[in-house]
C-alpha cells in the first residue's frame, strides 16, 4: 500500500524514496553503495520540483511476486544467503551481505507499487531511483543485481492487468542481459537497449545481431555504442529506438535509465551527458502519451559516479514533469 505525503493527482510525477530501498547496496569498497539514494534525493530537492512531485514509499514484494520472474530455488537461495550474510550470489560481483533479501524485495515492491499507481490512473509517470536491476537472470544473480524488478514488473503487468505488449527501454551503459535473455523468445516483450559495445564492457552481450529467437526473432533491438560515444552518437541511435517503438505500439513503457553511460563513470567508457537522459525520457513520455495513455515507469539502474547519478536521474524526473 502506498503511503502518500501529499494528495495524489494524475498531473504530478510519483517518485519513490525511503530507507527500505536506500538499503540496497553492498558497502565499501563495492561500487554499488547505499549512498546513491540520498545523493539523488538531495539533487532532486534542489531542483525546485516539489509542487510537481508526490513521494511514494515502498513495501516488500511477496514471494509469489518474485516468482513471476525468478525460480523458487533461486529465491530460496537468496533468502538463505542473506540470512547468513556471507558468500556470493553469483560468481563474484554480488555479495550476500546481511539483509540483502529484504532490500532487494523492497526494490521490487517499490516498482510494483508504482505500476499499480499508474495502472489505477492515479499517475501517468513514476520514477524509482534504486531499481532497474537488469542483470539478474530468472535463476541467478549477476552484476550487482539480486532480483530483476524490470522483469517482474513486465510479468506483473501481464498477470495483474492483462497488459500484453510491454516496452522495456534501457539506456544503461551495460547491456540489459537479464531482460534480453529472460524474454528473448517472447515477441510481445518490446525490447530496445542502447549500451556500450559488449566487446569492451560487462556482460559482453548485446550485439546488434541479437534480435530474439524463435517466434521473437527480429523483434528485439540492441544498439551497441563504441567506447567514447557522446550525445550525438546517442541521438542517432535514439532515432532508431523511436522508430522501433512507433511500429511496436506498446501498451506500457518501462525505462531503465542507468547513469553509468555518462562521462566520468569509473567502470564504463561512454561519454554522454545528462541531457541524453532528459531527451530520452521526454521522447518516451511523448510515445507513452500517444500509445499507452501516458503510462511510463522509470527505474534508476546503474551509475557509480555519484554526481552523474544525481544529475541524470533528476533530469529524467524533470523531463517527466515537463511533459505532463
Image (cartoon, grey):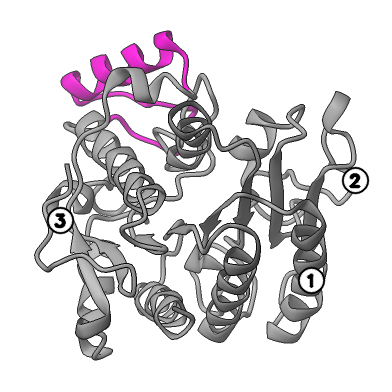
Looking at the picture, how far across and down is residue 254, in whole percent? 53, 53
Depth check: give the residue in front, 136 or 61. 61
Quadrant for the N terminus, please: top left
Q: In screen coordinates, is 244 left or right of 122?
A: right
Which residue position holds label 1? Answer: 237
Q: Residue at x 73, y 70 (%)?
A: 227
Label 3 neighbourhood size at 10 Å, few (<14), some (14-19), many (20+)?
some
Q: Residue at x 23, y 39 (%)?
A: 103
Q: Residue at x 34, y 17 (%)?
A: 64
**CB under 8 Å between discs 3 and 1:** no
Q: Which stretch did the figure color magenta?
A: 70-97
**Label 3 vs label 1: CA separation?**
35 Å
User: Dividing the picture into quarters, in which one does residue 190 lie?
Assistant: top right
Q: Is residue 270 magenta?
A: no
Q: Is residue 77 magenta?
A: yes
- Image height check: is 96 above or below 110? above
* SS of the residue under disc 2: loop
Which residue position holds label 2? Answer: 209
The answer to whether one can see residue 213 in this image is no
Amino acid at each position: 500500500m502506498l503511503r502518500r505525503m501529499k494528495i495524489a493527482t494524475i498531473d504530478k510525477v510519483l517518485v519513490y524514496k525511503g530507507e527500505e530501498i536506500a538499503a540496497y547496496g553492498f558497502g565499501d569498497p563495492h561500487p554499488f553503495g547505499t549512498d546513491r539514494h540520498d545523493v539523488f534525493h538531495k539533487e532532486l530537492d534542489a531542483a525546485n520540483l516539489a509542487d510537481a512531485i508526490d513521494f511514494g514509499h515502498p513495501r516488500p514484494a511477496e514471494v509469489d511476486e518474485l516468482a513471476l520472474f525468478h525460480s523458487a530455488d533461486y529465491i530460496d537461495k537468496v533468502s538463505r544467503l542473506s540470512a547468513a550474510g556471507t558468500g556470493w550470489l553469483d560468481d563474484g560481483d554480488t555479495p550476500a551481505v546481511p539483509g540483502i533479501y529484504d532490500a532487494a524485495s523492497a526494490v521490487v515492491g517499490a516498482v510494483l507499487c508504482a505500476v499499480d499507481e499508474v495502472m489505477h490512473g492515479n499517475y501517468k509517470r513514476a520514477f524509482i531511483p534504486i531499481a532497474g536491476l537488469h542483470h539478474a537472470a530468472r535463476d541467478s544473480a549477476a552484476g550487482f543485481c539480486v532480483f530483476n524488478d524490470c522483469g517482474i514488473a513486465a510479468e506483473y503487468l501481464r498477470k495483474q492487468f492483462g497488459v500484453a505488449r510491454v516496452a522495456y527501454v534501457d539506456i544503461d551503459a551495460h547491456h540489459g542481459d537479464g531482460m534480453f535473455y529472460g524474454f528473448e523468445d517472447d515477441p510481445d516483450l518490446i525490447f530496445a537497449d542502447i549500451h556500450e559495445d559488449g566487446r569492451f564492457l560487462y556482460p559482453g552481450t548485446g550485439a546488434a545481431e541479437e534480435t530474439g529467437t524463435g517466434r521473437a526473432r527480429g523483434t528485439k533491438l540492441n544498439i551497441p555504442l563504441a567506447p567514447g560515444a557522446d550525445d550525438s552518437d546517442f541521438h542517432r541511435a535514439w532515432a532508431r529506438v523511436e522508430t522501433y517503438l512507433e511500429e511496436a505500439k506498446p501498451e506500457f513503457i518501462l525505462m531503465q535509465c542507468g547513469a553509468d553511460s555518462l562521462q566520468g563513470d569509473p567502470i564504463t567508457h561512454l561519454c554522454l551527458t545528462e541531457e541524453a537522459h532528459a531527451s530520452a525520457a521526454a521522447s518516451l513520455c511523448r510515445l507513452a502519451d500517444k500509445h499507452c495513455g501516458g503510462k511510463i515507469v522509470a527505474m534508476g539502474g546503474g551509475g557509480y559516479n555519484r554526481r552523474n547519478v544525481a544529475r541524470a536521474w533528476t533530469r529524467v524526473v524533470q523531463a517527466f514533469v515537463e511533459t505532463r
